[in-house]
């Protein structure tokens, strides 16, 4: 090494990891922190964050297909296939052939899956509450609207 003193890496919320940081980086940093918190909260239930997300979407949109869940969760069809197979093997969801199209399988939670999701929601509600209370109440609707709008922005630079 050159013997030069390296500046300390800033903690979250400091330097470029704080208000001076790039917006895209700050979104990613917030997402990673939230996901890690979710994973730790669900760990003893043996539910991963992606499994929780899939169960949430299947519960919200009963009869949804794997392709639909892939679009809803922004995960690849291959990843969804593995998650769904594991949830089905664990007795947490079932798939039935669609009456409209024989190649499409519609999913729904089993009673065990619904009970597990309810426990997951109870635990993750604490995280949601902490996130909500960390925002100034008068800004929450604007922040929610902005985050939803970001998901539809054309960021390709063209």
Image (cartoon, rainbow, N blue to C red):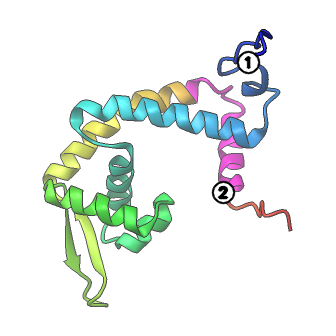
What kind of element bears circle 2? loop
Q: Which residue is mark 2?
A: 151
Give the total number of marks visible in the rendering: 2
Left or right: 48 in relation to 2: left
Q: Residue drawn 51% across and 60% down?
A: 74
**Magenta residues, as a range?**
132-150
| Quarter containing the N terminus | top right
Q: Residue drawn 34% across and 39% down?
A: 121
Left or right: 63 in relation to 151: left
Foreground of the two, 84 or 116: 84
Q: Residue drawn 36% across and 52% down?
A: 56
Residue 13 seen in this snapshot: yes
Left or right: 129 in relation to 9: left
Q: Which residue is mark 1?
A: 14
Say which quarter of the image contains residue 62.
bottom left
Where residue 87 sits in the image (x, y, percent)? 22, 56
Whether the residues at callouts 1 and 2 have beta carbons within 8 Å, the answer is: no
Q: Nearer the N terminus, badge 1 or badge 2?
A: 1
Where residue 153 sits in the image (x, y, percent)? 75, 60
Q: Which mark is residue 48?
A: none
């Amino acid at each position: 090494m050159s013997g030069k003193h390296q500046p300390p890496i800033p903690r979250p919320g400091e330097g470029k990891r704080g208000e001076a940081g790039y917006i895209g980086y700050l979104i990613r940093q917030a997402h990673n922190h939230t996901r890690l918190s979710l994973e730790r909260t669900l760990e003893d239930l043996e539910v991963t964050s992606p499994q929780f997300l899939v169960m949430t979407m299947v519960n919200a949109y009963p009869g949804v297909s794997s392709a639909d869940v892939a679009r809803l969760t922004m995960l690849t069809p291959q990843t969804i296939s593995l998650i769904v197979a594991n949830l089905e093997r664990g007795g947490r969801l079932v798939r039935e052939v669609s009456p409209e199209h024989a190649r499409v399988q519609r999913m729904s939670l089993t009673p065990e899956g619904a009970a597990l999701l309810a426990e997951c929601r109870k635990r993750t509600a604490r995280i949601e509450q902490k996130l909500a209370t960390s925002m100034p109440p008068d800004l929450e609707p604007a922040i929610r609207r902005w985050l939803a709008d970001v998901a539809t922005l054309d960021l390709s630079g063209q």
